[in-house]
Image (cartoon, rainbow, N blue to C red):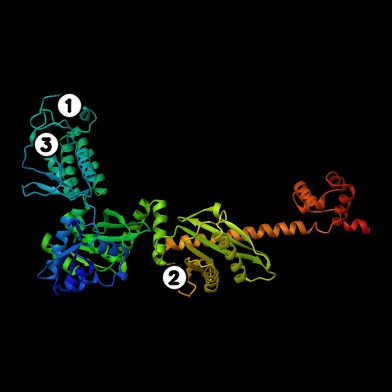
Amino acid sequence: MTFAELKDKALRLPFAPGVYVMRDSANQVIYVGKAKKLKNRVSQYFQDTAAHTPKTKMMVSKIDHFDVIVAASEFEALVLECSLIKRHMPKYNILLKDDKGYPYLRLDMKEEYPKITLVSKLAQDGADYFGPYGSRGVSQNVIDTVQRTLKLPTCGKQFPRDLGKARPCLNYHMNQCRGWCQLSRSPQEYRQRMGQAKKLLSGDYKGLAGQLREEMLAASDNLEFELAAELRDRLNAVEALGQKQLVTAGSMADTDVIGFAQTAAKACFVVLHFSGGNLLDKDYQVLGVQESQEAAISSLVKQYYLGRGLAPKIILLPEEMEDGALFEELLLQNFGKKTHLRVPQRGDNAKLVELAKKNALEEAERVTSLDERISGTLTLLGKMLSLPQPPGRMESFDISNISGTDIVASMVVFQDGKPSKRDYKRFQVEGLQNQDDYLSMRQVLTRRFVHYCQQDAGFAEKPDLLLIDGGVAHANVAREVLEEMNLSIPIYGMVKDNRHRTRALVTPEGEEISISTQPTVFALIGRMQEETHRFAITYHRQLRSKRLRYSELDGIEGIGPKRKEQLLKKFKSLTAIRAASREELGRLLPASAAEAVYRHFHPEEETS
């Protein structure tokens, strides 16, 4: 369908709740959304496209046709949306990766020799299931820990088939297994030990510890000291395990705290699980940068809890979900218990949300490489300045002088977000007797872009962005220079705060773009501004130092430029020249010149 046909179809949709399914030319589902009023929501995609985010623009450009499903209510639309997203995993929906799954542990006490196994789904078979756990690795670690704590078998032997068929393995001799493969061990004793495993997996550490303590004391009273010692060791292991909160947070948490944060290149969704005020575990998912935090949180929260198959009593959110009340109803319908979504504004719960946000930011930063961070920062800067693409080559200019003397300028180049020092240039402003930053900047920019027009070496590349140290007036000088040369390059002045940090960029028209709320952009522009100022002031100091060094020797009879160089090369400084004797000077200069230099620095000897 053409764009006009898509728009016409959208405008003929009903004012009713429902779900819309966008498809590409290959009939693949690329986006699923829900709406309170289908006509209003779907028609927005085909009207003011200039207002769309880049991701939405891309998605709309791929739409070949779409379908809608009218729902009886907003709640039914929510249920249908969640179901279709899970089924199709559309490219342009915000998706929670499901590759790791949410495994469970299964234990069937009806078997003669029960065994803890790892399964991916719950089944109505009368067995006990524990979980879900965050990953298969975590699940296997739980199994290994329980087996090690209770000295259960970890080998591949099948009971009762392999009972008594071989000698005990190395685990038995290392006191890591009780030798359950031997006929001396009864099924009843094995089942009792698996019952203890069930208590551990259920989180009943205190109950199991109490049971073991009673058995230990009874063995001691019966003078069965070896058994009492074994029970003591097992009791210590269980108590240590209980302190580590081995049990899955997903099945025990009463409160989950949601966090979301993003760097310039990555976003992270975090869930902190709490039980009785204690932090049990953390789940997180790293994603690409999201254009809308609200949409990302809403989508990810739905997928997370519907995928896990359970939810806690309370979910603390960093911001409201548009359809939060409907989602509460969906959780109640799916899991049979009420879950409350809350957005705390103050107090301990608000601090927990901040903690979750901090965890999310740390995870996002941890997995963001330097190149990704820089690329994301440039992309963000490009969007903030409405550039057609992220700036590759950025040039920054600054003027340096003291009371109008030794006026210099620096041109610093950042290529792909990094300093390109081989492209740095220094300019000595010519023909100005008094300090005038605007005329100085005009001269320097004119010289720079005359070189560009002539394609001179070192100046042949055209920048994607010009940054001028100063405000609107400085930016206007740059614009006038470029207009005179018929060049079109985005120009921004770097506006400083009272701490001499660049707080905003300003256009020649006076429009300010604040960068202080974007830490990565703020840091990049600040670094460029500091580097440009450093490069300019360093050059200025070099010229001033050279001028001062040479001026002291000016006017001495017989001392020209070449002999000045000889003196400074030999003695290194004016102080050393002043302290030199006639003999030392005479070894470098002709006698008359040496005498003239000595008399210049020691006039008192001549008058005494």
According to the image, label 1 marks what residue? 168
Label 3: few (<14), some or many (≥20) within 10 Å? some
The answer to whether one can see residue 36 in this image is: no
Quadrant assignment, res 294: bottom left
In this rendering, the label closer to the viewer, 1 or 2: 2
Measure how far apart labels 1 and 2 are at the Cα level. 75 Å
Q: Is residue 410 left or right of residue 504?
A: right
Q: Earlier in the sequence, mark 2 or mark 3?
A: 3
Q: Determine the residue positioned at 75% across, 56% down.
A: 549
CB within 8 Å, label 2 to label 3: no
* Residue closest to the eye, 382 or 169: 382
Q: Determine the residue positioned at 70% across, 70% down.
A: 433
86 w.r.t. 586: above or below: below
Under mark 2, the amino acid is Ile
Q: Determine the residue positioned at 45% across, 55% down.
A: 416
Q: Is residue 148 left or right of residue 436?
A: left
CB within 8 Å, label 1 to label 2: no
Quadrant assignment, res 94: bottom left
474 w.r.t. 419: above or below: below
Label 1: few (<14), some or many (≥20) within 10 Å? some
Measure how far apart labels 1 and 3 are at the Cα level. 16 Å
According to the image, label 3 marks what residue? 190
According to the image, label 2 marks what residue? 513
Label 2: few (<14), some or many (≥20) within 10 Å? some
Q: Secondary structure at mark 2?
A: strand
